Every structure is written in structure tokens, then in C-alpha cells.
Image: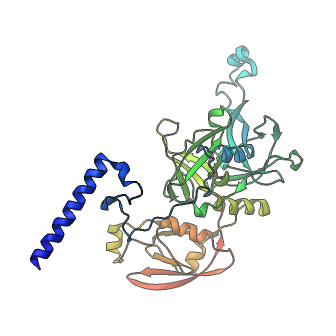
Amino acid sequence: MRRLWLTFAQAVTVCIAVLFTLKTLKPEWLTGWPTLVAVSSIPSPAISITEAPANHARGTDSSGSYANAAQKAVPAVVHIYTSQTIKVPRHPLENDPVFRHFFGDRLGESAQRRSGLGSGVVVSPEGYILTNFHVINGADEIEVASNDGQKYKAKVVGSDPESDLAVLRVPADHKLPVITFGNSDRLRVGDIVLAIGNPFGVGQTVTSGIVSALGRSHLGINTFENFIQTDAAINPGNSGGALVDTNGNLVGINTAIYSESGGSMGIGFAIPVSLAKTIMEAIIKNGAVTRGWIGVEVQEITPELAESFKLPTADGALIAGVVRNAPAEKAGIQPGDVLLDIAGKPVKDAQAMLSLIATLEPGKVSRLKLMRAGKVFYADVNISKRPPPRTQE
């Protein structure tokens, strides 16, 4: 048996040597023979790789260009020019007769004009335009310029400062091109996106990048935050412009950047179109956005606070204060309580708590799950309407 095995091994060795020699010196003799493949190059059966078809919805042509997406979306993005009258206060010496003799009434109160620029997106054939609240805040006059250079007067339909969105309108007979809405809920980190707007007033500009992160919050930009983060260049003047996918469909409204210089540093933020659409429809229907409110001040639960309150995790929101006669106080909620659940939805942190309360319908009763002194209890709260934010003078 041993001799038979040695004979077989020697025969295999000789065959491999002959094949190697022929492959090296006379490869044409082996035409039609199966090709030897290194074992390491054979895919493991445990790994399954699915290739996307060549025409998968990525919006590129054969050269890898995104020109088709840009061509589709650019005409629906407009430039917004605003002007505002600001009053210059009276000079403290205006009533002095000597100064009035020399300067007359020039020391009195005067008015100056201040202008600003931004971008907007035409969202319907009726002439509605979606933009940022900070683009049109305080404006006396608003002018919209389409991509072909035509200019139109626009009026404010309504705004929502807490999400930094506003809706404008121009007469429908202008027939401006309309954007196609995409689905921001299907975005993934790594998806390619295009930012379209009017940065620094240089004119319509398209930049590209990827989705860097989703669901960004705790940035201190808006009261309600759920941003798409992208490295597509967004600069001053891009605010209110479109963030589109590679098919030219709207997935976000460009809103803010993180910058130490005032220009793009690769960290930009856009409001998801799913949120923008809900707010836009509420503004068009009611002129404003109605949100729920219970009248509490909350703070984040740190690991140290979680330990002191004997909480298993840092999830939830600590009630730091309760507004007098507000729904929360009437329901028996006190400072020091920990809010764990709202209408069956868990509270992850203070920002999530604020968003969950805002979605509740005023006039309805909702059950809240809380913890006090280590014991869980429930409170039925009659949801009130969230008061408008205080305007800054």
C-alpha cells in the first residue's frame, strides 16, 4: 500500500512538472485546456456578492456624469433677493440748538436699506417656493430670480422659525419649472448628492458630495433638528437651495454649514424633504405649524445623573422645570421626574422628547411614563398648543 501511494504521488508530480514546462515554453500546445486558477482567487462559497445592474438608478450616463440629474433639478432652484429697511437711531445731540444750527435735521432718525440673498426651490405649479426662514426673516421686499434670469415679486405664505423653513409664492401664471420630490427616508450614508444654489451671489452652482451622516441633532441650529449631513460644498447664498439625489429628485433643503472661515469646510446640513414637506403642507393649509406642548424644561441625563437617579441607562429626559399652570403641572409632573416614554414611544434624550411632544395633537390626552424616586408612574396630560417662539429684538 505504501509503495502504491508513493508511485501515485510521483506520477502526479511528473504530470505537474510537464504541464508547467509546456505552459512556460509552448503555451499554444495547451489551447482548449482548462486554465489553472490560484486557489486564493476562487470566491468563498460563504460570501455572496450581489452586483447592481449597469442601469441601476444612479442617475449617471455612460461617462459617469451627473449632468442629467443637474439638468433636471437646476431649473426649479431659484435665487432669492431680499431687502429690509433698518432705522438708524437719533443722535443724542439733535436737540442741542448749536448742533442743529450746523447740522440741521441730518442728526435725526434715518432709514437705510439692507439686502440679502439666498436660494429657494419651486415645489408646485401653483407657484409655491420652499426656502429657509432665515433667508427671508425681516424682509420688506422679496424678489425671486429664475435660472433663465426672469425676476418676480414674491410674498410670504408663512414660516416656521423653529425648523427654519418658510414658504413663498409667486403668481402661478409665471409657470416656473417644478422640482420632483424624492424620498429622504431611503438615503444611506455614502449616497451621492448634489447641492444646488446661489453661493455668494455668483450664480447658479452645482456641487457634489456624499451623505456623511443622517439624523444629526444637538447642533444648536434649530429648535427641532434632524439634519442630513453632507460634504457637498454649501456656502452662504446656498441656504434654501436644493439637495438632490443622482436622479435629480429633491431630498433636502440646504440650511447651514459648520465653518470657522465662513466658507465650506466639508460639513453642511440639510433639512430632510420628508420633514420639509410636512411643514410646507401645514404652512400652506394653516399659515403656520401647530405643535404639541406640555410646559416643561428638560435636560440631558448624563451617566453621573443616571447613577444618582439609579437609572439603568442614560436614556430619558430629566424634568428640570415645570411652567406654572401648564399641562404638565396640572398632571402632577414635578421637577426631578425622569420622562421615559411618551404615548408608547421611548424617550432617548431631551431632543427626542421635544420632537415627540411636538407631534402630539393639541386638545388630546396622552399618557406619559415617568420615574420619581426610583419608582415608575404614569401621568395623563392634556396636550396644549406650543406657543410661538420669542422674537429676538
Q: Residue shown at 32%/47% (left/top)?
A: 26
Instruction: Residue 323: name its quadrant.
Output: bottom right
* Residue 114 position in % (x across, y down): 69, 33
Q: Quadrant of the N terminus?
A: bottom left
Q: Is residue 64 above or below residue 338?
A: above
Describe residue 351's horizontal placement relative to residue 96 as left or right. Answer: left
Q: Quadrant of the C terminus?
A: top right
Q: Which residue is situated farthest in the front direction here?
A: 29
Q: Which residue is situated farthest in the right direction here?
A: 173
* Residue 5 position in % (x across, y down): 14, 74
Q: How is the image coloured?
A: rainbow
Instruction: Residue 374: name its quadrant.
Output: bottom left
Q: Is residue 91 above or below residue 51?
A: above
**The one of 261 and 174 positioned closer to us in this rendering:** 174
Q: Residue shown at 51%/61% (left/top)?
A: 51
Describe residue 247's horizontal placement relative to residue 336 as left or right. Answer: right
**The one of 62 and 138 positioned closer to us in this rendering:** 62
**The one of 81 and 21 positioned closer to us in this rendering:** 21
Asked whether residue 295 appears in the rendered view, the answer is no
Q: Which residue is situated farthest in the left direction here?
A: 2
Q: Residue shown at 62%/57% (left/top)?
A: 57
Describe residue 195's horizontal placement relative to residue 277 as left or right. Answer: left
* Residue 301 position in % (x across, y down): 40, 68
* Residue 126 position in % (x across, y down): 84, 54
Asked whether residue 39 appears in the rendered view, the answer is yes
Q: Residue shown at 38%/64% (left/top)?
A: 43
- Counting the numbered discs, the total is 0
Q: Which residue is situated farthest in the top direction here?
A: 102
